[in-house]
Image: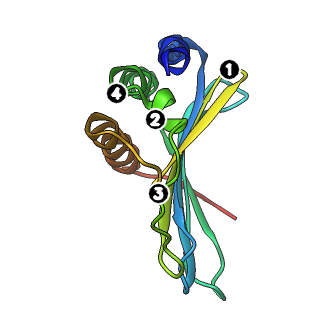
Amino acid sequence: MILPRLFGHKFRADEFESCSVSTGGGMTGGFCDTELRREKDGRATVTVRHKEWHYEREEKTVYPASEEAFAHVAELVNRYGLYAASKRRMSRIRILDGDTTTVSFHFGKRYFSIRQLQRKWPSARKGYREVIDFLNSLPGGEGECGS
């Protein structure tokens, strides 16, 4: 248990490439994905993809983001020990026909994700929720629609 904690403190904002919150898997076929990322040209963007039903087209909108958003997410990862939380077992509870949420992080060559149904200690649950709320609050203003 000590190794995930040690490795988790190595995540820094300067190597932070992307973070996404994905919610989906329900009976209606809908999903929502919000991703904070650095583009190849160096711009920071927030991309939102969503649809509500199986038969609908996916809608995609790209918003500008600030570098401070990367620093804030990296700080949340370290403060709440989210890397260690990603190594926890899954709950015995299964949701068969409802949406579930996954938060994914890319730091350089390292990748990890935390699922809604993983067993988390209270501070990790709080950090998980804070990352979700923060990423979902980022899109604002005029975005570029895409396909």
- Whichever of labels 1 and 4 marks the residue nearer the N terminus, that label is 4
Residue bearing mark 3: 91
Q: Residues within 10 Å of mark 3 (few under 14, many from 20)?
A: few
Question: What amino acid type is highlighted by mark number 3?
Answer: Ser
Q: Given contact means CB atoms under 8 Å apart, are the residues at marks 1 and 2 in contact?
A: no
| Residue at the spot of label 1 | 108
Residue at (66, 31) in percent of width and height: 111
Is mark 4 in CB contact (under 8 Å) with mark 3? no
Q: On the image, which quarter does residue 123 sit in?
A: top left
**Label 4 to label 2, Cα distance in Å?**
9 Å
Is residue 48 at all visible to an observer of this figure?
yes
Residue at disc 1, secondary structure: loop
- Residue closer to the observer: 49 or 98: 98
Q: Position of residue 72 (x, y in %)?
A: 37, 25
| Quarter of the rendering occupied by the C terminus | bottom right
Q: Which mark is residue 85?
A: 2
Residue 98, relative to residue 4: is it above or below?
below
Image-based side of 8 in relation to 130, left or right: right
Measured in 3D between alpha carbons, the distance from the residue under mark 1 to the one under mark 4, in whole angstroms, is: 20 Å
The relative height of residue 30 versus residue 8 in the rendered view (above or below) is below
Give SS at disc 3.
loop
Q: Mark 2: few, some, or many residues within 10 Å (few <14, many ≥20)?
A: many
